[in-house]
Image: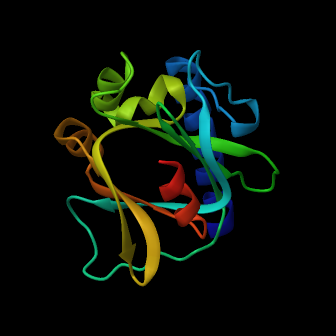
């Protein structure tokens, strides 16, 4: 009987998610369908990267960041787009886009300050950042991204990390 309740709870969650997505107009966006904006050009792409976040509040005392190489990161002259492979599929769904100040797009600060960084309605979070630095976390090379106060408080985000084996190439391009 417990198994039936478990299945009913799963079905309920799926139905709830479908209803919320229909009400908010949220649709999945995929990196395979990603189009650059006018004047935007791709600087660097890594299909074997990893993206991680460090929370402002409620973070663990010790955190490790495994290198599963399941994210695709596209760094352009205007933003960073991060996608992750979907379960049981071959496509990569957009999960985050990061804009750096002051070059952020017109709608970036507004989207970043919305509930969950504008996730509902867009299908991915928008983060505005103030700085980036090449560093080392848990003996792994990464790019540390520091969010703005507005974006950090709206998303409970202290820092974001991009781990890659090709960071020297990125550093040279930037």
**In the foreground, 91 or 140:** 140
Q: Residue at x 63, y 25 (%)?
A: 36
Residue 127: quarter of image:
top left
Q: Residue at x 30, y 25 (%)?
A: 109
Residue 143: quarter of image:
bottom left
In this image, 148 relative to 74: left or right?
left
| Residue 150 position within the rendered picture, expressed as x and y whole percent measured from the top left | 20, 36
| Residue 90 position within the rendered picture, expressed as x and y whole percent measured from the top left | 82, 51
Q: Residue at x 62, y 36 (%)?
A: 42
**In the foreground, 88 or 8:** 88
In this image, 53 relative to 87: left or right?
left
Residue 33: quarter of image:
top right
**For residue 106, above or below residue 62:** above
**For residue 4, above or below residue 10:** below
Q: Residue at x 51, y 56 (%)?
A: 172
Residue 36 visible in the current orientation: yes
In this image, 18 relative to 51: left or right?
right
């Amino acid at each position: 009987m417990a198994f039936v309740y478990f299945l009913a709870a799963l079905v309920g969650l799926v139905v709830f998610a479908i209803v919320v997505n229909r009400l908010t107009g949220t649709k999945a966006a995929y990196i395979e369908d990603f189009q650059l904006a006018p004047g935007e050009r791709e600087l660097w792409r890594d299909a074997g990267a990893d993206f991680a976040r460090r929370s402002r509040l409620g973070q663990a005392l010790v955190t490790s960041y495994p290198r599963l190489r399941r994210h695709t990161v596209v760094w352009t002259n205007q933003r960073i787009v991060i996608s992750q492979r979907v379960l049981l599929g071959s496509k990569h769904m957009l999960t985050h886009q990061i804009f750096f100040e002051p070059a952020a797009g017109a709608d970036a600060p507004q989207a970043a300050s919305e509930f969950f960084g504008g996730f509902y309605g867009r299908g991915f979070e928008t983060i505005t950042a103030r700085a980036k630095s090449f560093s080392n976390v848990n003996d792994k090379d990464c790019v540390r991204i520091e969010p703005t106060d507005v974006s950090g408080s709206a998303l409970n985000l202290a820092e974001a990390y991009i781990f890659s084996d090709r960071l020297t190439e990125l550093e040279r391009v930037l």
